[in-house]
Amino acid sequence: MINVLYDNRQDFMEITDENMKAIEEAINATIKTENVMGNFEVSVSFVTNDEIKELNRIYRQVDSETDVLSFPMDEDEEDPEGFIMLGDVIISTQKIIEQAEELGHSLQREMLYLTVHSMLHLLGYDHMEEFEKEEMRQREKEIMKELKLFK
């Protein structure tokens, strides 16, 4: 079971109930595909390019905008309701709009891709080395196929 906490700190893109339901499906598909068992909690924040740039500068020492940031929790402790906090996903809605336009995707598809990408980071994947990047891309494709968003 998954519990998703939402924080919308932007006004560039409306975040609808349908969006939130799709995000939860993407998170569940990622967890299922990775064969992770348990009750998990994830926070998903929607921010502006300015805010994500500042977070990127503070936490990664990279002074530029990015589309999504992931902050895994390194704790396996359950909260009082029995959920393990996987971490935080922070998405720039301005980047969703820019990249969806650039790639010819729907806003929903771009938002779900960024969610899957970030969830894989929360589950321990990285793409610093080429072999890691290839493995992560393969996992993303599998999950996007499961969501019927990638052929």
Image (cartoon, grey):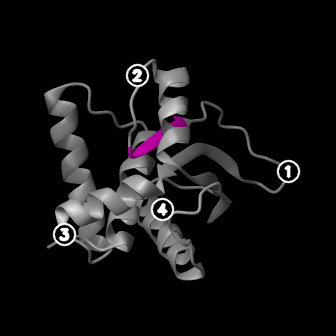
Location of residue 36 in the rendering, given as x and y in whole percent from the top left corner: 48, 53
Say whether disc 1 or disc 3 marks the residue closer to the N-terminus. Answer: 1
Q: Residue furthest bottom?
A: 18
Quarter of the rendering occupied by the C terminus: bottom left
Residue nearest the observer in this picture, 105 or 143: 105
Which residue is label 3 attached to? 104
Say whether disc 4 or disc 1 marks the residue closer to the N-terminus. Answer: 4
Residue 60 to residue 16: above or below: above
Residue nearest the observer in this picture, 106 or 125: 106
Q: Whole-Å distance between the Cαs marked 2 and 4?
A: 27 Å
Which residue is label 2 attached to? 62
Residue at left offset 66%, top offset 60%? 6
Q: Which segment is the magenta one?
A: 67-71
Numbered marks: total: 4
Which residue is label 1 attached to? 80
Indicate yes or no whether the magenta region holds residue 103.
no
Question: Pointer 1: residues within 10 angstroms few (<14), some, or many (20+)?
Answer: few
Question: Pointer 3: residues within 10 angstroms few (<14), some, or many (20+)?
Answer: few
Residue type at mark 1 is Pro
